[in-house]
Image (cartoon, coloured by chain):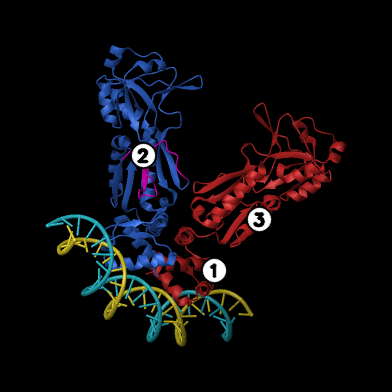
Chain colours: A red, B blue, C cyan, D yellow
Amino acid sequence: MDQLRAIRYFIKVVETGSFTKAASTFNVPPSSLSRRVVDLEKSLGATLLKRTTRLVKLTEVGQIYYNDVQQIVNQLEQSHETVRSYQTTPMGRLSISSMVSFGDKILLPLLDEFNALYPEIILDVSFSDELSTLGRDDVDIAIRGGYAPNERVLAIKLMDNEFIPVASPGYLQQHGVPSHAMALKHHNGLYFKTPLGPTPWLCKVDEQWHDVSGPAVVISNNGAWLSKKACNGEGILMSTRWALAPYLESGELQELKFEHQLAVTQNSNMAIYLLYQKQRYLVPKVKAAVDFLVQKIKVEAD
Amino acid sequence: MDQLRAIRYFIKVVETGSFTKAASTFNVPPSSLSRRVVDLEKSLGATLLKRTTRLVKLTEVGQIYYNDVQQIVNQLEQSHETVRSYQTTPMGRLSISSMVSFGDKILLPLLDEFNALYPEIILDVSFSDELSTLGRDDVDIAIRGGYAPNERVLAIKLMDNEFIPVASPGYLQQHGVPSHAMALKHHNGLYFKTPLGPTPWLCKVDEQWHDVSGPAVVISNNGAWLSKKACNGEGILMSTRWALAPYLESGELQELKFEHQLAVTQNSNMAIYLLYQKQRYLVPKVKAAVDFLVQKIKVEAD
DNA sequence: AGTATTATTGTCTTAAAGACAAAAGTTATT
DNA sequence: AATAACTTTTGTCTTTAAGACAATAATACT
């Protein structure tokens, strides 16, 4: 029995929920899949699928098995790609996942340059603030803030991700410039929301953390929109220095400085990391992109 | 092409270093292996093996590929065992790896009991202080001291692993009872050696660590031998409280107490952990053993 | 209830792996 | 240096397993 083929069939049947649909993706008759999956079940001594003519569902062990083999087949595929592309020029589809805000401001311009450099690499870029599970999905490179990666994933710090409080001159004129961090509690807040929830205003005084968040005006994960609102004088915003840079330069917003520095998390080493799977660095396209991005962004940050 | 079969052939060829030897383990002619490996190499577009008639060696990519697929095939095998044994009574070979000293004193008596409880489980117990790479090898359960496991491995703390200094009454009469930890520097040392090297005598005074190791008489990883020497009054020994318990009770050795407690590592949470792979807990024999050992040892520790 | 869809089963065909013998290439020994 | 011993590869045939296609059985929707 071609075990691996049977497993691939099984996986596809689970994913499509149908023998017929799965069969069509392999260009073989459904009967083949049916037979192979039965073979597999016999060899395992367990039924993996509950078949009703209308839909195919996983059994309890089937679910366990599916989770395992899905990942295993994925790994195998990656390993084959590593060998196949070993010592060739960078080429093929490269999928990058980035935080939304970072993508707009910094990543996209760089990718244009990257594209010109490696025309044989087809970029597949998606923006999302969700913490994608690198390795599970087929994302080659992910860019995320403040991340604790697992052992198989390598993280390179690209740049700091310092959050600073800002407000428009108009707002400060009307409501006064807060002299002490504690005073922020009486100011209107425009809150940035990460996948982990809204970011509070925190402040460390005498080794003690205080939440100095003021009443919320809006909460959003859309940085540009929040910045607009801040410019309109609707409240105080805490966002990353690099996202606010253009507004600070134009004077539309100004940074608030306090004796006790503000933060949005007690975890001090907030930074932006580039993540990739260790083994995948052997694939030329991945190596090219990692090296390029790290070099470009680290230089820019200086 | 039966990819998986080809990969299994390839792995065996690498392990045995010979097509002929590998072929005999599969009970097929060597020509089959030769053909399948060539197929595999063709499909990957790379040569994996450097064949000279006398020995077969891996190429550079071959080495990378071998590391990958060896692990992948292992995972697949484990996954199949999980399914096959799902909801059956605990049975089959169970391999346990334990630290030497812990094995003698605590584990073996328990395993006799375990064996009586689950006669269908064939125990394969090996003792070694080397840090075995759980998952890479086929060890189901490992027992180790002070371990930082990876994400796929679960660690359950079985008991504390407190090191205490002891000496025989004779030794103390002859050399005097050290009044302060610092005084140990002038005492003969019997040093216990872990895979990470000999264990120094450390002592924390005013938030500052000091090495108070005295001149070494012997260094060994054999706890029983060191204990004997300590009984003979040859020096001061630091070993685990549970290993020394019988000598302390009989009065052959006595514990030295200091204002500033001694340790053999700055890492405070030294303890003995039971380690196993998360997924493998689904295999009845593994679950039975983990549950049994945890329960028994935790109860004994009270 | 009837129809359409879907999985399974039966039978034949095709493709791929195994068996066995022979050849080619290496290393070690005489 | 040449031969002997061993190992991998190649050639040819046989056997085994997967694919093709039609037919059947079973289920859900109209």
Q: Circle 1 sits on which residue?
A: A16
Task: Determine whether, in the image, residue A225 is placed left or right of residue B65.
Answer: right
Amino acid under label 3? Glu
**Residue for point 32% across, 48% down:** B95
SS for tag 3? helix
Question: How many residues crowd mark 2 within 10 Å: few (<14), some (14–19), many (20+)?
Answer: few
| Distance from the alpha carbon under mark 2 to that under mark 3 | 63 Å
**Residue for point 55% across, 61% down:** A91
- The quadrant of the image that shows the N terminus of chain A is bottom left
Instruction: Tell me, yes or no, whether the two marked residues, 2 and 3, touch with CB atoms within 8 Å.
Output: no
Q: Circle 2 sits on which residue?
A: B296
Q: The magenta stretch spans which residues? A: B128-150
| Distance from the alpha carbon under mark 1 to that under mark 3 | 38 Å
Task: Determine whether, in the image, residue A286 is placed left or right of residue A183.
Answer: left
Amino acid under label 2? Lys
Residue B98 visible here: yes
Residue A267: in magenta span: no
Amino acid under label 1? Thr
Question: How many residues crowd mark 1 within 10 Å: few (<14), some (14–19), many (20+)?
Answer: some
